[in-house]
Image: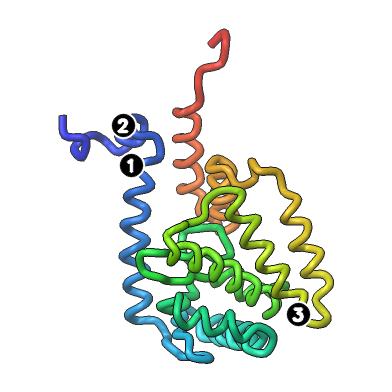
Amino acid sequence: MDSERLPLLERCRRGGYAWLNRRVRQVEAWARRTELRKGTRVELHGVGVVLARGDAAGTGVCLEKVQAALDLVARHDPRSLQAMRGHFSGILVWNGVHAANGSYLHPERLCMLNSRYVRAEETEPARIAMTLIHELTHAKHFSRGRPLAGVHAEWLCIGAELAFIRKVPGTEHLRRGAARRLERRPDFYSREAETQRGIADLEARGARWSVAFLRFLQRRREPARPGR
């Protein structure tokens, strides 16, 4: 039987998360293209920035913070700013499906920032600048044909963040935070851990039905316990 004609839950059961992930990525790609086309587009320091549609106040806050973050990169690490112009087709600030603060999409050479992270009161421009440096490190390795993956990728990217933030005065707390992230256990970056963070993010956003569905799939995938 054609797998595409199977019921949704059966397709998810047979393919684990693979089938569901493909569908999520397809929907996300459509949403991303829509935002890139219809969002607010500006150019900051020669880097194209697109702010997804949303409330005017939130868009204004995101624009101010990203502008301030790029100001810091221009002032303290102009070579990285020049690299962003070459490696990034643009920066998209939007409320995507991923819980990560930032991500890099190599096929589109697109740097993405989570709008909730950017808008958050505790997220200062210097922290956003570190995230941009992090994603730039991924972009550089992709362009060299050596894409980074797993825990070693994150360690290299966090190391780049530290090298940058040490140049910015008054950021000792951010340096300590980056150093703590270097001490994380390798399993923090496992697929299972990323899934759990994604579920927690959905819970925080009030997406109860999505959370219930994902937890149901997890239970279906778990091996039966002895005695059951």
Element under label 1?
helix
Residue 42 in the image, given as x and y percentages of width and height: 45, 90
State the residue at coordinates (53%, 84%). 82
The image shows residue 70, relative to residue 199, as above or below, that is below
Q: Earlier in the sequence, mark 1 or mark 2?
A: 2
Tally of numbered tags: 3
Q: Tell me if I can see residue 100 in this picture.
A: yes
Label 1 environment density (alpha carbons within 10 Å; few <14, some 14–19, many ≥20): some
Q: Earlier in the sequence, mark 2 or mark 3?
A: 2
Farthest residue toward the top? 227
Q: Is residue 61 visible?
A: no
In the image, which is nearer the foreground, mark 1 or mark 2? 1
Question: What's under tag 3, amino acid-wise?
Answer: Lys
Residue for badge 2: 10
Relative to residue 67, is residue 213 depicted above or below?
A: above
Label 3 Cα crowd, 10 Å radius (few <14 / some 14-19 / many 20+): some
- Tell me the number on the disc at residue 104: none
Q: Nearer the viewer, residue 27 or 148?
A: 148
* Left or right for 125, reference 141: right
Q: Is residue 171 above or below residue 146?
A: below
Q: Are marks 1 and 2 in contact (CB under 8 Å)?
A: no
Nearest to N terminus: mark 1 or mark 3: 1
For the residues labelled 1 and 3, the Cα–Cα distance comes to 45 Å
Q: Which residue is mark 3?
A: 167
Residues under labels 1 and 2: Cα distance?
10 Å
The quadrant of the image that shows the N terminus is top left
Which mark, by number, is residue 19?
Answer: 1
